[in-house]
Every structure is written in C-alpha cells, then in structure tokens.
C-alpha cells in the first residue's frame, strides 16, 4: 500500500499547480497547462482510495464520518477563507455588474456545485462571453467534493465481505471508469463545457488513480528500475501534453488520456525508485510548493482575475508575475495559519462530530458571503436624464407595388420586369452617433438599463426561434405579415438575430412574411467552426444550413437577409476565418440561393467593443468615455471590405451599417438615452429598433422591387 507521505506525490503536485498557473498567467507558452487539473484528479483518486483501503485492511470497515471529518479539516478551512477573501476583494475592485454573478459563484462554491454552475454558463452562448469568474477554478474542487461524497460508500460496498473483495473492487472501479470515459468522449463532441466541468465525464480520471491504488501491491512487486523508466515516460507525456494540447482541441475526450496515463506512470514509479522521477520531484522547492499546492491553486486565480479589474487590464507580464508571487505569499500564510492548524488540530481529530459541525459552519459562511454580495444594491447610473436621440436623415420615397414603374415604353403593351434599386448604405455617420462620443454620464433613463442589458434580446430568443447549439433543423417560426404571399427571411447567427425585431416591424408594415432562420454561432457559408459552447468543432451547423436552404426553396423566399459574426473561428486554431474563406464561401452560397429563386442582402457585422460594455459602464457611470472604443479597434476594415466584396462580386446586395454605429474615428456605447451594446459584441434590441426608419429606407425599395419583378415575371 502507498505510504502516507510520498515525496514523489508532493513533487507531482508542484508540477500540476505550476503548469496550471503558467497557463492561467499566459507564461512560457503552456497552452495546455490546464491539464494540471487532470493530474490532480488522478492523484486524488489514488490517495483517497489508498487511504480507504488502508483503513479497511486495518479495521475491516470504512468509517464514513471519520472520512468526511478528514476531508472537512483538509479542504474547507482554506476553501472558505479564499471564498470570503475573494468576495471582499471583488466587492472592492470588480465592476459592480459582476458582483451578482460572483455572489452566485460563491454560493455554488460553498455548496460544492460550482462545476454545475459553470457548465450551465459555458453552454449559454451569451453568458459564455462574459469575463471569467474569480471563483471559476472552484469547479475542480466541486468535482472532487462530489466524488468524495459517493466514493467511500461505493468502495465500502465493493469491499463488503468475501475473500475476493479486492478483485471485486477492482472490477467495479474499472466498470465505472470505463463508463465514465465513454460518457466523456461522447459529451466532449456534444457539449464540451459539460464534459469539461461534469463529474460524470471526469470520474474516470479519479478512477484511474483508484485502480492504481487497488493494484498497488502488484505494482510495487515490479522492478524499481522498470517503474522508474515508466515514471520518466510519464513525466515526458505530461510535459508534452502541456505544450501540445490547446483550448481549441476536443478536450477532455480522448486527449485527456495523455495526462492521466502520464500521471499513473509517475505514481507507479513510486518513492523508492532511485532512478525514477522522484530524484527530481524530491527537490526542496518542489516539496515546498507541493505541500502548499492546494492553497496556491485556490489563491492564484482570484489574484489574476481581480487584479486585472483593479489594474484596468489586460495585465502586462510583470503584473501577472507580481500577482502570482502575491498569491503564493497569501497561500503560504493561509497554509501556516489556517490550513495546517485546523488539519492537525488534536481536538478536531478526536472529536469527529465537532469537526463536522465546523465544516457545516464553514459551508454556511461561504454561502452567506455569496448571498450578501449577490443581493448588494449597486448604483448603475447618474441623476442625468438624457433625451431620446433624433434621427436626422434626408427624406426617402418608398416605392410600393402599386406605384413602381415596371414597364418599358420601348415595347408598347408589353410588361417587362426592371431591376430593383440597390440597397443604400449610409455614407456618413449619424449626427446622434457623433454626439454620443461626447457622452460622459450614464443617464438614469438609459434604455435598456445596465442591469437589464443582458435581457434585452430579440423575441426569437424567448420563443425558441433562435436555435440553440444542439439543433440541426430549422424551426417553423413565421413572423411579419403571416398572411402574405411574399416571403423574406433572416439567415445567420446571433449577429443576424440582433436585427430581428427591426425586420419584423418593417415586414409587418410592408406586408412581408418573415422567416426566422438563425442559430447561435453558425456561419452561413459551408465551413465548420470552433465554438466554445460546443467544443473543438461545431458539426450541427452543416445540417442546419442544409435545412435552411431547403426551407428557403420550399417557402419560395424572394429575399434573404444574411448577417453573421465575421470573427467566427476556425477549428484547431481559434482564429477568425481568413479572407479567402469568405470569398470562396460566398462564391458558393449566393449563386446557390439565386438558382433557388432567392436574392441575398448582406447586413455587415456590427463593431466589437473589445469588452462587455454594460460591465464596463457599471464602473464608469460618470466616465462613459472610458468604455467607448476606436473604429479601428471595433471594425477590422480589411475583413469588412473582404466580406462586402465577397457579396458584391457574386451579385448580392449589401447594407453596411457601420456608420450607424461609429463615427469616422470612434464608436460610442451610449447614444442619447440608448445603450448601444448589450454585451461585448451584440447591439441592444432598443438600439436596433431605433434604427428602423433608416433600415426601412435602405432595404424596402430593393425588396419591393424584387417583389414587383417577381409578380410581373
């Protein structure tokens, strides 16, 4: 059986926490440093199972109260201290709009369900773009805590009576682990956040360590030299995985085998192999870090997240190093003053009921701190009352089916379709947008309010007509004038959906039947994208696009409005598609639509502020200019030009909306009393609705021209 104190394990913990920190701090290019958590999982499974097997061997039973008492003394004091410290620091330095979520996360962390909260948030396309939580790293602690709740009882059941109880336990652990691994592979391809954060998809990693613990008597019977060689192979596998695996890959899935197998090999090498990894892992510095790895892990992430907010990040390399150093100091102090005294307390060690009561109190304190922060009132505006912005635009005559001239006098008595007028894009910024640059105070009559910004979404989000990640076929949603025989459609991702309310209003007024054909994160062109809410690939987009094209043809849609994020990312590299991809994609899409009888109108992408605007404004209610951004930053001009050219070269119309959102130099975030952005990249529905007269004037002559030509033809 494994001994209670092993230098190789302390050193391995140091490696694990070290690579996690380097990854989080973006140092040394460790793009896959997050696999340090996988190392921790295997080590935890090994140590906990070894402890339980040792107890069962000595007493023929496993005491659940004593086990939970040990876990309380080991985990909860430091955990509670960091939760409370993070809540206090967050209250001081984080933007006010982030406090409610941080309070929720503190409650989840104290209640051992942080992984579930973050999995749900990760699969919500709109929430997934929010700044990271200062307690997000508690997901791994929640996974372990959930494992600890069920594992002792399950192991006790597997070991209950019988001469072959150990073999039965090994078979049981193997079955559970294999089942979890299969679930992990499947879940990674369907919903990567749930695979990453869920116990059901991570249990096999803890199970791998548990199997090693059960097999330990046979492992130590092997040659120390052979185990030592295997250990060095394991170290090489772990280090290679840190550099070779990236966020853009399908992780955990099959890729997680690398750090898991590597860790098993290092553990199997043991503490007695004179030529194994222990000769490096027993180094004094490694032992010091390993002993404090739990506290260091807890402190480092809040330091980086809250430090970035306090220093108005992004952080420089020097700032990141300084914050990590500070977190190590804090970890050292909490280890000495809190973690060790509680864990080694003779009183608590001998009075298990008292220990459990202390644990319950610590849970209550963590949850209570979160509840207080979550319900704290925050001031999100000034006393200024702003006027609604005025649209100043030249009058535009709107052609209707009854007045449009569709004949040519060159052939009396013959009706000849004429080409519809082009869609007109604004050539100059709006006066109200120019005035918006000078806005410095958040008005108390802001629409929507900062607190309500995330909920200011088009109605198709609430009725299921904007499809989620798992959908592969179009919805049957029809809007506008549903009785009309003339059909138009909106096609694209959430950057298309943000225009829905405006187009729906125009469609009702103009007598157009409107199809909502939007789905989160899916490009209209035939390319597979990376999407954080799904995983390394987003295969559901391809069948959905096929369904859209089939629907457009079946409904005989005359015009389709296409819009999308031009920063959708390529699989494997997490970088926006290069220009040629858009050129090739539209060269395929637009002719295909036209053959089916549908004309395309591209609505250009909206600017990217570079940060969550409501969150930024919540800490700058009297300094709104701090949240505005340059046109150059918000609009990648070369990418915009390429997308426009890709549409025009293939005969589509283009509505360039950038001058409705930016001046020649900058892009405001508040115009009059209107909030322009609801998050880091979507405009508010209120702002889109304010633009209705301009959108109507730009597109209706063209659409009515298509309508008349279709009628005459």
Image (cartoon, grey):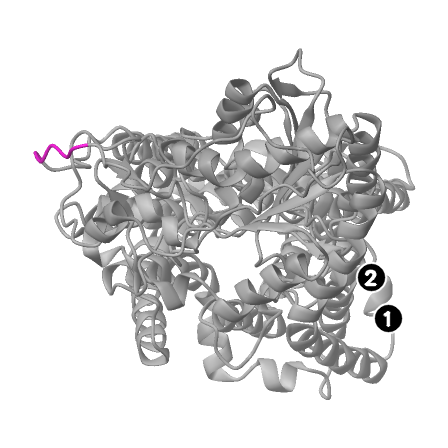
In the image, which disc is placed on residue 244?
none
Q: Is residue 510 left or right of residue 39?
A: left
Span colored in magenta: 383-387
- Residue at 42%, 56% in the rendered image: 298
Mark 2, Cα crowd under 10 Å, few <14 / some 14-19 / many 20+, is: few
Q: In which quarter of the image is residue 611?
A: bottom left
Q: Position of residue 289 (x, y in %)?
A: 46, 73
Looking at the picture, tell me which residue is in the foreground, 537 or 707: 707
The answer to whether residue 351 is seen in the rendering is no
Looking at the picture, tell me which residue is in the foreground, 91 or 274: 91
Q: In this view, does 554 lie to the left or right of 406?
A: right
Label 2 – label 1 distance at C-alpha: 7 Å
Q: Secondary structure under badge 2? A: helix
Q: Position of residue 195 (x, y in %)?
A: 69, 45
Q: Position of residue 580 (x, y in %)?
A: 70, 70
Q: Where is residue 208 in the image (x, y as percent from the top left)?
A: 77, 55
Q: Does the magenta stretch include residue 380?
A: no
Which residue corresponds to mark 1?
Answer: 221
Q: In this view, does 633 lie to the left or right of 31?
A: left
User: Is 631 placed above or below 204 here?
Assistant: below
Assign the magenta stretch its main secondary structure: loop
Q: Do the residues labelled 2 and 1 touch (CB within 8 Å)?
A: yes
Looking at the picture, tell me which residue is in the foreground, 361 or 93: 93
Q: Secondary structure under badge 1? A: loop
- Residue at 62%, 22% in the rendered image: 512
Mark 1, Cα crowd under 10 Å, few <14 / some 14-19 / many 20+, is: few
Which residue corresponds to mark 2?
Answer: 217
User: Is 194 placed above or below 224 here?
Assistant: above
Q: Quadrant of residue 295?
A: bottom left
């Amino acid at each position: 059986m494994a001994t209670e104190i092993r230098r190789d394990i302390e050193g391995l913990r140091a490696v694990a926490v070290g690579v996690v920190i380097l990854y989080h701090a973006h140092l040394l290019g460790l793009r896959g440093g997050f696999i340090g958590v996988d190392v921790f999982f295997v080590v935890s499974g090994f140590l906990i199972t070894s402890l339980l097997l040792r107890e069962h061997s000595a007493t023929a039973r496993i005491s659940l109260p004593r086990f939970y008492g040990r876990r309380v003394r080991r985990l909860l004091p430091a955990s509670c201290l960091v939760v409370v410290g993070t809540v206090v620091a967050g209250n001081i330095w984080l933007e006010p709009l982030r406090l409610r979520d941080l309070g929720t996360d503190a409650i989840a962390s104290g209640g051992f369900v942080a992984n579930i909260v973050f999995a749900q948030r990760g699969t919500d396309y709109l929430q997934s773009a929010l700044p990271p939580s200062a307690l997000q790293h508690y997901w791994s602690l929640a996974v372990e805590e959930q494992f600890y709740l069920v594992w002792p009882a399950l192991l006790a059941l597997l070991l209950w009576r019988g001469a072959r109880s150990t073999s039965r336990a090994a078979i049981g652990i193997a079955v559970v682990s294999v089942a979890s691994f299969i679930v992990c592979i499947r879940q990674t391809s369907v919903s990567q956040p749930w695979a990453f954060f869920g116990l059901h998809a991570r249990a096999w990693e803890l199970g791998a360590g548990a199997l090693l613990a059960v097999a330990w008597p046979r492992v130590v019977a092997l040659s120390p030299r052979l185990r030592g060689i295997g250990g060095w192979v394991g170290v090489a596998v772990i280090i290679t995985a840190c550099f070779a695996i990236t966020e853009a890959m399908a992780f955990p899935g099959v890729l997680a085998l690398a750090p898991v197998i590597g860790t098993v090999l290092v553990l199997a090498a043991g503490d007695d192999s004179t030529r194994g990894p222990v000769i490096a892992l027993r180094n004094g510095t490694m032992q010091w870090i390993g002993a404090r790895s739990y506290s260091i892990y807890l402190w480092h992430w809040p330091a980086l997240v809250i430090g970035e907010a306090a220093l108005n990040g992004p952080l420089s390399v020097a700032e990141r190093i300084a914050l990590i150093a500070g977190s190590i100091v804090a970890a050292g102090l909490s280890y000495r003053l809190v973690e060790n005294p509680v864990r080694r307390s003779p009183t608590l060690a001998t009075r298990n009921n008292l220990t459990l009561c202390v644990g319950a109190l610590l849970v209550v304190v963590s949850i209570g701190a979160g509840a207080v922060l979550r319900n704290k009132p925050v001031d999100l505006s000034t006393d200024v009352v702003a006027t609604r912005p005025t649209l100043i635009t030249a009058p535009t005559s709107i052609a209707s089916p009854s007045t449009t001239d569709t004949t040519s006098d060159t052939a009396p008595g013959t009706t000849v379709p004429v080409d519809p007028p082009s869609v007109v894009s604004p050539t100059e910024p709006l006066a109200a947008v120019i005035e918006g640059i000078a806005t410095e105070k958040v008005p108390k009559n802001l629409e929507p309010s900062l607190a309500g910004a995330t909920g200011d979404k088009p109605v198709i989000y609430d009725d299921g007509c904007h499809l989620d990640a798992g959908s592969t076929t179009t919805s049957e949603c029809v809007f506008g004038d549903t009785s009309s025989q003339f059909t138009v459609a909106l096609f694209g991702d959430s950057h298309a959906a943000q225009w829905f309310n405006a187009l729906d209003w125009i469609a009702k007024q103009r007598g157009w039947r409107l199809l909502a054909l939007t789905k989160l994160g899916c490009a209209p062109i035939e390319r597979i994208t990376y999407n954080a809410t799904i995983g390394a690939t987003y295969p559901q987009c391809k069948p959905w696009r096929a369904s859209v094209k089939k629907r457009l043809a079946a409904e005989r849609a005359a015009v389709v409005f296409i819009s999308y994020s031009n920063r959708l990312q390529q699989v494997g590299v997490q970088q926006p598609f290069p220009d040629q991809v858009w050129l090739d994609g539209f060269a395929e899409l637009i002719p295909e639509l036209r053959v089916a009888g549908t004309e395309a109108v591209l609505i250009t992408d909206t600017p990217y502020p570079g940060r969550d605007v409501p969150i930024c404004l919540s800490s700058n209610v009297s300094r709104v200019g701090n949240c505005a951004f340059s046109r150059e930053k918000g609009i990648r001009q070369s990418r915009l030009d390429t997308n426009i050219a890709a549409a025009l070269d293939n005969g589509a119309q283009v509505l360039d909306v950038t001058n409705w959102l930016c001046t020649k130099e900058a892009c405001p975030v508040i115009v009059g009393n209107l909030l322009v952005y609801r998050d880091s990249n979507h405009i508010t529905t209120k702002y889109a609705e304010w633009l209705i007269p301009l959108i109507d004037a730009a597109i209706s002559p063209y659409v009515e021209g298509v309508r008349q030509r279709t009628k005459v033809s």
